[in-house]
Amino acid sequence: MHIPDGYVNLSVAVTVAVVTVVVLAVAARRVDGDIDGERAPLVGVVAAGIFAAQMLNWPIPGGTSAHFVGGALAAVLLGPHLGALAVATVVTVQSLVFGDGGVVVLGANVFNMAVIEVYVGYAVYRLLAPYSRFGAAFAAGWLGITAGAVAAALQLGVSSAFAYETLTVLAVMGVSHLLLGLVEGAITAVVSRSLVDARPDLWPDRTEVSAR
């Protein structure tokens, strides 16, 4: 899902980057002072795991790539705001240090993976968690990555720099990530359940939803 430079119009890249900065600034204010001594190591572990998983990607038609993103997993384990900041850090390091995704379109890539996937994934999780945490985590991973792919497809489709029509890009990205989302959902559910079984005290909403 990392978009390279040259595929998105500069006006689109700048507009999405501004929105991304605003959202992450609000997220940073919401989590200020919210990382206690016990949860701090979890942030590092989640970010490191997502970083490693995102480095394993493969190309799909249309000039982008498919891979595990981990936005929903970060949201479920860390909460939406801290999760968004963690994924944004991962995507930024990948772009600036490893060249995975363009620099000009960094704001768009962060928006798709650290804003859209994290917040959509968390919304799905909170909606379904009262019925089953495991099922909610699966749905969050599945629908979160699909929403991020659709956002990327829209940015590519409306850009004259890209060679394909919007509907074509939506079809390719949407279908590809709907299928990938099944894997992402499974990983999100299994990993989150394993961690909450091992350390239930670190679960961000442990007082609001009973484990199932």
Image: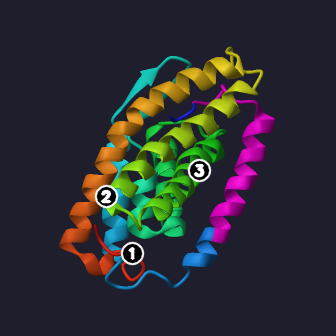
Q: Which residue is mark 2?
A: 134
Q: CA distance from mark 1 to mark 2?
A: 12 Å
Residue contact at pointers 3 and 2, CB within 8 angstroms: no
Q: Residue furthest right?
A: 11
- Left or right of 112 in this view: 12: right
Specify the quadrant of the image occupied by residue 181. Answer: top left
Q: Residue at x 49, y 44 (%)?
A: 143
Q: Nearer the viewer, residue 56 or 154?
A: 154
What amino acid is labelled 1 in the image? Val
Q: CA distance from mark 3 to mark 1?
A: 23 Å
Write down the residue under mark 3.
Answer: 116
Question: Is residue 13 on the magenta stretch?
Answer: yes
> Relative to residue 75, is residue 163 depicted above or below?
above
> Where is residue 107 drawn, in percent x and y?
65, 47
Tell which of 158 and 200 is nearer to you.
200
The percent position of residue 184, horizontal first and vertical second, equals 36, 43
- Residue at the outermost front position: 131
List the residue tagged with mark 1: 209
